[in-house]
Amino acid sequence: MKRIGILTSGGDCQALNAAMRGVVKGLANSGDELEIFGFYDGYKGLIYGNYRSLAAQDFSGILTMGGTILGTSRQPYKLMRVPDRDGLDKVEAMKHTYYKLNLDCLVILGGNGTQKTANLLREEGLNVIFLPKTIDNDIYGTDITFGFQSALNIATNTIDCIHTTAASHNRVFIVEIMGHKVGWLPLHAGIAGGADIILIPEIPYDIDKVVEAIDNRTEREKGFTILAVAEGAISQEKAMLTKKEFKIFKSQVGYPSVSYEVADQIAQKTGREVRVTVPGHMQRGGSPCAYDRVLCTQLGAAAAQAIEDKDYGNMIAMIDGQTARVPLGEVAGKLKTIDPNCQLIQEAKKVGICFGD
């Protein structure tokens, strides 16, 4: 009899259910008896003992379903060692729930913050397997995270749809793509959608370079310009500020996001009409794409095998097209950013895409 706990934590994405299904089907087909405990709302369920016993058939029919059947919540890693309002020690509470249920392993699906807490639980002696989920694709130690490709399809489709209205009205359009700290999603969506300008956090932009790129298109009788802007894009001037200075600046400006600031500056410098489109959480929604369904099936099956092998404390990664077990202690807390000089950036520049640098 194997007793497995499973939870999804942090922001949602399209392929969480598909990944859980892969794990459970992989274990169910091993021949051993299986008991599954699903924790509601991420680590919150583990902390407060909010769970239910599940059977393998409860994970049938969810391959194509977006979101997560277990629910999720954000439990910041930096607060995990801070008692709750009632003085409860969260780490000890999670350990208590784990041992109370006599779990053989806890399967955790999530992003960077979730990963750090998973590693903390590993350090506390719990058997943990982690699966990398995020639409940002910024988890260190894996080539791809599930959720990224599904979100990329939506972001790309948004840019595709903007093309017709931008061309019809000869306007400058900004499409704001998710990505606070890294620009994988706006970079790939911008290239796939044929954006003329892409602004990402890893390459601080000069607004005059952005305006120059728009003017160059106008001179070539290109009536419209499309910008794919990461929500975490930053100007060269602001990139020089300390974190404290930048925080003060953000509290003083009246723009909803960087895209509206960029739009205002372009309008002032060019006299052009600028529109901003923010697909927002649409990028996290809907059904997982075919790529993510295959990826999650692979990662889930590999996680099941790691559990059968009792090889715990690992992230199940995808490296060079193959699943791999990566020790959590080697990757937790690290961020996978874009190298501004990488081949993809250079090739994008070669075809005329401006990055504002």
Image: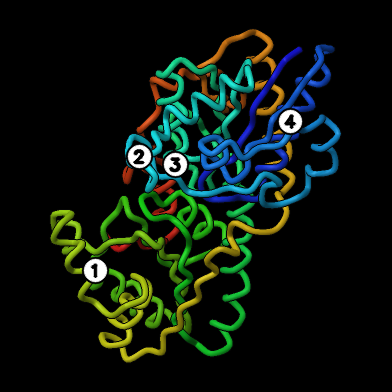
Near mark 2 (Cα within 10 A), the count class, few <14, some 14-19 or many ≥20, is few
- In depth, the one of 100 and 298 nearer the eye is 100
* Residue at x-position 35% and y-position 33%: 334
Tell me the tag on residue 83.
Answer: 2
Query: What separation in Å lies between label 3 and label 1 (alpha carbons)?
Result: 24 Å
Q: Amino acid at mark 4?
A: Gly
Query: What separation in Å lies between label 1 and label 4 (alpha carbons)?
Result: 42 Å
Q: Amino acid at mark 1?
A: Lys
Which element is circle 3 on?
loop
Near mark 1 (Cα within 10 A), the count class, few <14, some 14-19 or many ≥20, is few
User: Image check: 242 left or right of 186?
Assistant: left
Query: What separation in Å lies between label 2 and label 4 (alpha carbons)?
Result: 35 Å
* Residue at x-position 71% and y-position 42%: 17
Q: Amino acid at mark 3?
A: Asp
Q: How far from the left and from the top, in percent, is residue 7? A: 61, 36
Provide the residue designation for mark 3. 138
Instruction: Check whether the beta carbons of the residues at disc 3 and disc 4 lie within 8 A of each other.
Output: no
Near mark 3 (Cα within 10 A), the count class, few <14, some 14-19 or many ≥20, is many
Q: How far from the left and from the top, in percent, is residue 348? A: 44, 53
Give the foreground label among 2 and 4. Answer: 2
